[in-house]
C-alpha cells in the first residue's frame, strides 16, 4: 500500500510539473507570434505601394496571423501532421499528383481545419512564402528584380515557421475535439496539394530571367520545420528524360530549343540529387506514375495511396483511373527520340539520362 501511495504521489508531482510547463509555453508563444506579426506587417507595408494586389496580400497575412495568435493560446500538444514536399522537375507529373491529392482523405480533412478552405487557407499562405506569381513577388525563391533590393527573407522565413506551427495546432485541436486518432503519420503536402496554390514547386518553377535559379531549397524547408517543431518529409516524382523534353518543349512550349532543355534539366536534376541525398532518412518514396516503367510498379501505387489516407488500394486506384482514363504511358520510339534530340546533342542527352538514373 505504501509503494502504491508513493507511486500516486510521484504521478501527481509529474502532472503538476507538466501543467506548469504547459502554462509557461502558453504564455510565451503568443509573445513570439506577436513579434513575428509585427515584422510581417512592416514587410508587407511596402507592398501597399504596388497597388491593390499588395493591399490584398497585406490584409490576407494580417488575418492569418490573427488566427494563429488565437490558436497558439490554446495549444493542446501532439505531433501534428507530417508536412511533405513533393520534389520533381517540370513535366514529371505535378498536375496529376495534384488531381490525386484533391481527392485524398488527408487533404479533404485538412480543408476542414480552415474556414478559408482551398483558396485562402494557411496551406495556400504557406506556399506563397516560397513562390508567388504576383508581379511584385518578394517570395523566398522567386523574387522580382525590384523586390530583390529590399527582400526580407528573415520575415518570410518566420512566417513559414508560424504557419507550420499554426497548422499543427489546429490539427491537434481537431484531434481532441472530435476524438480522432491517426494510425501512424498523417501526411500533408505543401505543394501540388489542390489548395489552389500559386504553383507546383517544380524544378525550376516559373519562367523569367532567373528561371534556372527558381528552385525549392530543401535545407531551408527542414530548418523551418525544426524551428516550428513539426515533422517534415519529402517524396520524389520522376519521368523518362525524353518524355520530359516532349512535355515541356513540344507540348507546352516552356523551352523551344532542345539544347536549352537538356542543359536546364540536367542542371536542376543535379540540384535535386544533391538535396535528396542530404536527407535520405526523410524520403517517403520515388514515384513515376507518368513514366513508362514506373507506371507498372504496383507497390508504388499502393504506397502512395496509403501515404495520403486511402484505406484500400482498390479505392485509390479507382480514383487514379477516374483522373487519368488512359491505359498508361508508352515507351517512346527511337524515331520520336531522334526527332526530339538530334544526333549532335546525344552526348548532352546522355548526361541528362545519367543524372536522372542516379536520382
Image: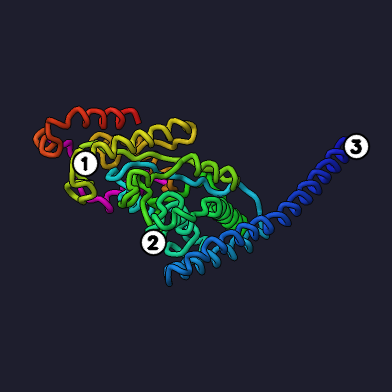
Determine crowd level at label 3: few under 14, some 14-19, many 20+ residues with C-alpha closer than 10 A. Answer: few
Mark 2 vs mark 3, foreground winner is 2
Q: Nearer the viewer, residue 69 or 186?
A: 69
Which residue lies at the image location 38% right of the left edge and 51% below the top edge? 192
Q: Which label was assigned to residue 245? A: 1
Instruction: Kindly identify the residue that appears in the image at 22 percent across and 46 percent down.
Output: 255
Q: Secondary structure at mark 2?
A: loop
Q: Is residue 312 magenta?
A: yes
Is residue 24 within the magenta segment?
A: no
Q: Which mark is residue 2?
A: 3
- Quadrant of image for the N terminus: top right
- Residue holding disc 2: 134
What is the x, y in percent for residue 149?
Answer: 46, 54
Which segment is the magenta one? 311-333
User: Of all residues shown, which one is farthest toward the front?
Assistant: 149
Nearer-the-camera pick, 151 or 202: 151
Upstream in sequence: badge 3 or badge 1: 3
**159 w.r.t. 93: above or below:** below
Q: Are marks 3 and 1 in contact (CB under 8 Å)?
A: no
Which quarter of the rendering shows the C terminus? top left
Q: Is residue 168 visible?
A: no
Q: Earlier in the sequence, mark 2 or mark 1?
A: 2
Say left or right for 327 vs 56.
left
Which residue: 13% across, 30% down? 344
Question: What's the CA distance linking mark 2 and mark 3?
Answer: 69 Å
At 35% from the left edge and 35% from the top edge, which residue is drawn?
Answer: 299
**Rendered view: 355 above or below 67:** above
Task: Name the element at disc 3.
Answer: helix
Query: How many numbered marks are there?
Result: 3
Residue furthest left as drawn: 335
- Rate crowding at label 2 as few (under 14), some (14 to 19) or many (20 or more) other CA atoms within 10 Å: some
Which sits earlier in the primary sequence, circle 2 or circle 3?
3
Amino acid at each position: 500500500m505504501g509503494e502504491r501511495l508513493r507511486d500516486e504521489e510521484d504521478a501527481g508531482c509529474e502532472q503538476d510539473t507538466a501543467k506548469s510547463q504547459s502554462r509557461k509555453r502558453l504564455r510565451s508563444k503568443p509573445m513570439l507570434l506577436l513579434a513575428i506579426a509585427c515584422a510581417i506587417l512592416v514587410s508587407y507595408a511596402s507592398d501597399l505601394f504596388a497597388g491593390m494586389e499588395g493591399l490584398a496580400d497585406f490584409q490576407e497575412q494580417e488575418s492569418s496571423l490573427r488566427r494563429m495568435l488565437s490558436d497558439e493560446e490554446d495549444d493542446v500538444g501532439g505531433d501534428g501532421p507530417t508536412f511533405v514536399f513533393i520534389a520533381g522537375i517540370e513535366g514529371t507529373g505535378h498536375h496529376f499528383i495534384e488531381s490525386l491529392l484533391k481527392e485524398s482523405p488527408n487533404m479533404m480533412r485538412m480543408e476542414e481545419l480552415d474556414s478559408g478552405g482551398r483558396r485562402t487557407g494557411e496551406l495556400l499562405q504557406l506556399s506563397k512564402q516560397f513562390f508567388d506569381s504576383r508581379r511584385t513577388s518578394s517570395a523566398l525563391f522567386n523574387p522580382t528584380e525590384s523586390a530583390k533590393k529590399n527582400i526580407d527573407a528573415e520575415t518570410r522565413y518566420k512566417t513559414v515557421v508560424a504557419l507550420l506551427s499554426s497548422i499543427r495546432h489546429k490539427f491537434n485541436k481537431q484531434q481532441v475535439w472530435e476524438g480522432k486518432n491517426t494510425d501512424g503519420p498523417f501526411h500533408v503536402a505543401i505543394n501540388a496539394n489542390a489548395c489552389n496554390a500559386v504553383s507546383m514547386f517544380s524544378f525550376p518553377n516559373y519562367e523569367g530571367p532567373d528561371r534556372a535559379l527558381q528552385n525549392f531549397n530543401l535545407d531551408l524547408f527542414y530548418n523551418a520545420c525544426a524551428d516550428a517543431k513539426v515533422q517534415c518529409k519529402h517524396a520524389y516524382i520522376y519521368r523518362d528524360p525524353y518524355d520530359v523534353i516532349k512535355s515541356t518543349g513540344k507540348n507546352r512550349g516552356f523551352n523551344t530549343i532542345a539544347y536549352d532543355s537538356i542543359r536546364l534539366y540536367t542542371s536542376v536534376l543535379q540540384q535535386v540529387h544533391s538535396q535528396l541525398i542530404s536527407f535520405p532518412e526523410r524520403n517517403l518514396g520515388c514515384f513515376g506514375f507518368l513514366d513508362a516503367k514506373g507506371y507498372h510498379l504496383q507497390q508504388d501505387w499502393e504506397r502512395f495511396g496509403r501515404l495520403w489516407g486511402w484505406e484500400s488500394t482498390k479505392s485509390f486506384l479507382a480514383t487514379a483511373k477516374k483522373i487519368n482514363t488512359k491505359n498508361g504511358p508508352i515507351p517512346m520510339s527511337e524515331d520520336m527520340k531522334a526527332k526530339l534530340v538530334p544526333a549532335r546533342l546525344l552526348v548532352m542527352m546522355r548526361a541528362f539520362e545519367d543524372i536522372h538514373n542516379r536520382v
